[in-house]
Structures are given as C-alpha cells and as structure tokens.
Image (spheres, rainbow, N blue to C red):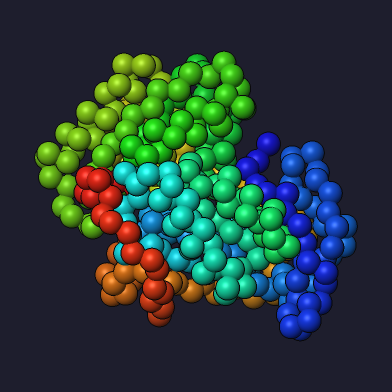
Amino acid sequence: MFERTSARKEVNGSASGTGSPVAGSFCDHDGVSSPTASPSEDYRRRPIGVFDSGVGGLTVLHELLVALPQEDYLYLGDTARFPYGERSPEELQRFALELAEVLLERRAKLLVVACNAATSAALGVLQERMRETTLGVEVLGVVRPEAVRAAAITRNGRVGLLATPATVASRAYERALAAVDPHISLTPVAVPGLAAIIQEGREFTAEAVEVVRAACEPLREAGVDTVILGCTHYPLIARMLQRLLGPRVRLVGSGPALARQVEHALEVRGLRNPQPREGSYRFLCSGEVEAFRRLGARFLQMPLGEVEHVAVSQAPAAAGAGGGR
C-alpha cells in the first residue's frame, strides 16, 4: 500500500562498532520490510533524515516533530539549487541521490523525501539504490500518503491537485490515485512560481492572489471536493486556498499523512528511538545559512538554532528559475 523500499539489512554489530540493522527480513501485508530480529539500540537511536529543495519540507518536519517527538531528526534543505519545480527528472534523480548520500553519511536510519517534485521523479531510483546496497534504509515519499488520504475522504470521487510543473508533468499522482481507487478522477493544475513567492517571504500582492485564484478556478469548475496540496510550501497559504476553493472543499497536505507512514514504518521495522526524552533536530543547507535560518523558523514555527552548510554539485539554473518546486 505504501511507497517504500523492501531494503536489506546489515548483520547486527558491524566491524566499525556502530549498531546496524539485522540480517533477514520479510514483508508485512502493507509491503513494509519487517526484520526477523530487533535492530540494535545504537541503530534505533540514529536520526531520521529528511530532505527537500528548500524550506518547504519543514512543514513536513513540523508534523513529524509533533507525531514522533522522541525521535531525532536531521533536515537538509537544498537551497543552493532551489527551485526544483521546473527541473528535469534526470536532474532531480541526481540531486536526490546526492542529498541521500549526505544524510546516510551522517547515519540516518530512515530517509524522508519531503519534496513532491523529488518524490515524483526520484523515489523509485532512491529505493532501487537502497536495494542494491546492504544499508537497509527505508525511503519514504510524500506522493502516496497524500493520494491514500485524498481517496479516503473524497465524497464525490473528484479530486484536485495543485502542484509545480515538474510534479504535474510526472503524472505521479494519477498513478498513485489509480492504484488506490481507479474510479477517482483527478484534475491537476500546475502553478509555476508560487513556491518561490512563498519561500522568499515576499508580500502577497494582488497579482499573486490572482495567480492563486486562476489556479483554483479549474478545480471549482471540475466540482472537486478534495484538493491535494502537491507542494510542501502550499500549507502556508492554506487559508487563502480554502477561501478561494470554498469551505466545503477539504485540503490534503503531505505532513500529517506522511507522519503516519513514518510512524508505521518505524513500528514495523522496530526502529523507534528508545529514549524517553524529547528528541533533537539539526539542520543542514546547501545555500546561504542565515537566509535558511530566517525562513526556516517561519516554516517550522520553531527556532532552528545552528545550521551547518554542506557543499553540493552545482547545476545550471532551472528553466524559468522563478518557478515552484
């Protein structure tokens, strides 16, 4: 039911002395890889790695902090290459593999792709890479949980999608919804530029509101009763969207749905952090540190503290670089 790799596992107690997952696994009825023995305590104390093209994924991290407060988290925002929303699938796959490697080097026990464009283009590639290794790390994305949630709550079977051009072009949500319920119809709308406006914290002008209004119009005409927010930046304008779509339309964001999936994966694989105290959270970014800290606090609704800069491979600016992610 859920998007995640079956992943292999290392033998418990590696030569380096760090704990690791145990050898052998089976899949439960949801397709979640389940260990035949418990992972070591050291491994369970490792952080959950989360990455995004910028600060939008902090809306997902916020939900994880609330749902799983005892876990430690490591968040990586690829602000140097933001926005992702008009990148090619090949670029997004390369970026995702690079960011995953940064988090794995820092001993992440589970990876969360908190970016809709990266999930749409690269989730399968990431999962395959984990299958090719003996790391045994699950990779979870934002698309499937939102599709499952939208299918569960729609009353008339008509669902809308607001997303970036890359996400809409991937048709990932069409496939995910069809897998859950082939009778649901999806009306996708690409909204270039909106994520960049939200991330940069610019004032919402009358022109920007009209961009959002124009994006909502096809959804109103289609009579959708449920709308998927296909970009992790969009929850920050949920009230505006609700006003423009109408009070009876239900909005589905990635944060709550993905938090439930992460909780399920930790439970099935025996990866819950055993510490009784509140967990920690740390931040990495590939762009300007102070800008990330300032914007991040607004998205996370919590102070960020120290932010570590990480170097990533450079890439040409995306076509229409003012676009969303």
* Residue lying at 24% horizontally and 35% vertically, measured from the top left: 212
* Residue lying at 78% horizontally and 81% vertically, measured from the top left: 15
* Residue lying at 38% horizontally and 76% vertically, measured from the top left: 309
- Closer-to-camera residue (312/116): 312
- Closer-to-camera residue (277/308): 308
- Closer-to-camera residue (62/80): 80
Q: Is residue 86 left or right of residue 2?
A: left
Which of the 4 image quarters holds residue 297?
bottom left
Q: Position of residue 289 (x, y in %)?
A: 32, 74
The residue most toward the left is: 206
When the figure is inspected, residue 70 is found, relative to residue 124, above or below; the finding is below
Q: Position of residue 67 (x, y in %)?
A: 59, 57
Q: Position of residue 90 (x, y in %)?
A: 43, 47
Q: Is residue 81 left or right of residue 209?
A: right
When the figure is inspected, residue 154 is found, relative to residue 71, above or below; the finding is above
Q: Position of residue 311 (x, y in %)?
A: 39, 73
Give the quadrant of the N terminus.
top right
Does residue 233 appear in the picture of this structure?
no
